[in-house]
Image: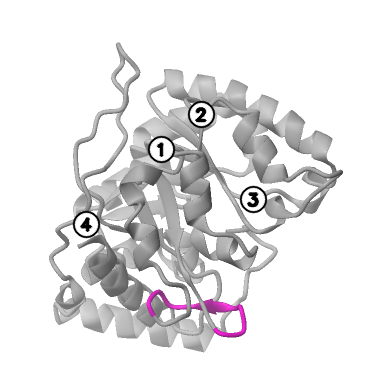
Amino acid sequence: MPYEHSTKKQKPELLDQQRRQFLKLSALGLGGAVSLGVAGLGMASLPLSADTKTVVTTAKVVPGLQLYTLRDLMAQSVADTLKLVAGVGYTQLEFAGYYDQSPAALKNIMDSEGLSAPSAHIPLDVMQKDLDKVIEQAVVVGHKYLVLPYLMDTDRKTIDQYKALAEFLNKAGEKIRSAGMQLAYHNHDFEFVKLSGQVPYDVLLNETDAKLVQMELDLYWVVKAGLSPLELFARQPGRFPLWHVKDMDKAGGFADVGKGVIDFKPIFAKAEAAGLHHAFVERDQTDNRVETIRQGFSALSRLLS
C-alpha cells in the first residue's frame, strides 16, 4: 500500500454519491446485514505483557479494514467515514494517516462507533524523524502494531540499502517492543526482485530479529510477484501476524475480495501456522469504495469462519 504513488483521485461528485449511498445504508441498518457471524480463527490481537514481553492471545481474528481504501472519504470527514465503516460491520481498522486528527480525537471517534485500530502504517521518514512521538501517539490511539508500509524508489535501489534498513528496523523494533507494541514490514512486489543476486525480502527476513520485526503480508503483491504465500509461511512460521487481503483480476489488476482469481482458501487454511492475528481488507484503487468494503467484509467473514 504505497501512500501517494498509486493514489487514484475520484471525481468529487462520485465521492459524494458513494458517501450518500453509504450513509443511507447505515441509516437503514443494512450495513450489518452483510455480517456472517464469524466463528473466526483462534489467533488474535497482540498485547505484550509488560513483565514478560510475551504474546497473549485474547480474541479471534475478525475482518479488519485498511483505511487507505477509503482515503478520499477520510479526507472529507473522518467521523462520517468511520461511522460508515462500522455500519458495514467492521470492528477493527488499520490507519494510513490520521488526517489532521489528534490521537485523542481519533480514539474518541472510534470508541463512539465500537471500533479499534490494532495497527497503523507509519512512513519510513516519519519513523526516522521522531520515533518517540510515533510511539506516544500510537499508545493514545491504541495501536498494537506499527507497520512500515512502503519504500520510496530512492530508498530501495541497492541491496545495501535493504541491509541498512534491516539494521534500522531492528533498533526501531526494540524500542517499539519495549513500549508494548510490535513493528512490522508491509511488502509490495519489488522486494522480490533480485538486486546484486539477492532477494531484498530475504534480506529483511534474515537480517532482522523475528521478535523485533514481523511481517504484514500483502497477499496480492506476493501473488503478483509470482510467489506463493504458503512458501513464505513454511520458511518463516509465525512471522506473519498481519495480512492484507485483496484480490486480483484476470489482467493482474485489483479486484474486490472474492471477485478475482486468487484462491484464498488454502492460504487461510495455513493462517495459524503463519501466525495470523489480524486480516485487513484493502483495495488500492476502486471505482466504488462502498461496494468494495461491503464485498470485502462479506468475503473475508466467510474465509475466517
Distance, label 1 to label 3, CA atoms, is 22 Å
Mark 3 or mark 2, whichever is nearer to me: 2
Residue type, mark 1 in image: Gly
The amino acid marked with disc number 2 is Ala
Indicate yes or no whether the magenta region holds residue 251: yes
Read off the residue under disc 1. 238
> Is the C-beta separation of discs 4 and 2 under 8 Å?
no
Disc marking residue 210? 2
Q: Which residue is at the front of the view, 298 or 226?
A: 226
Q: Badge 4, how many Cα within 10 Å: few under 14, some, many 20+?
A: some
Locate the N terminus and report the quarter of the image it occupies: bottom right
As measured in the structure, the alpha-carbon distance from the residue carrying label 1 to the one carrying label 2 is: 9 Å
Q: CA distance from mark 4 to mark 2?
A: 34 Å
Residue in the image at 32% along x and 21% along y: 54
**Labels 1 and 3 touching (C-beta < 8 A):** no
Q: Position of residue 29 (x, y in %)?
A: 14, 77
For mark 2, give the secondary structure: loop
Residue at the spot 31% in from the left edge and 46% down from the top edge:
272
- The answer to whether marks 1 and 2 mark residues whose Cβ atoms lie closer than 8 Å is yes
Mark 3 and mark 2 lie on one chain; the one further toward the N terminus is 3
Q: Secondary structure at mark 1?
A: loop
Residue at the image position 36 percent from the left and 47 percent from the top: 106
Give the residue number, with chain letter if any, for mark 3. 150
Q: Is residue 204 left or right of residue 179?
A: right
Q: Which residues are magenta?
A: 250-258
Q: Residues within 10 Å of mark 1 (few under 14, many from 20)?
A: some
Q: Which residue is mark 4?
A: 113
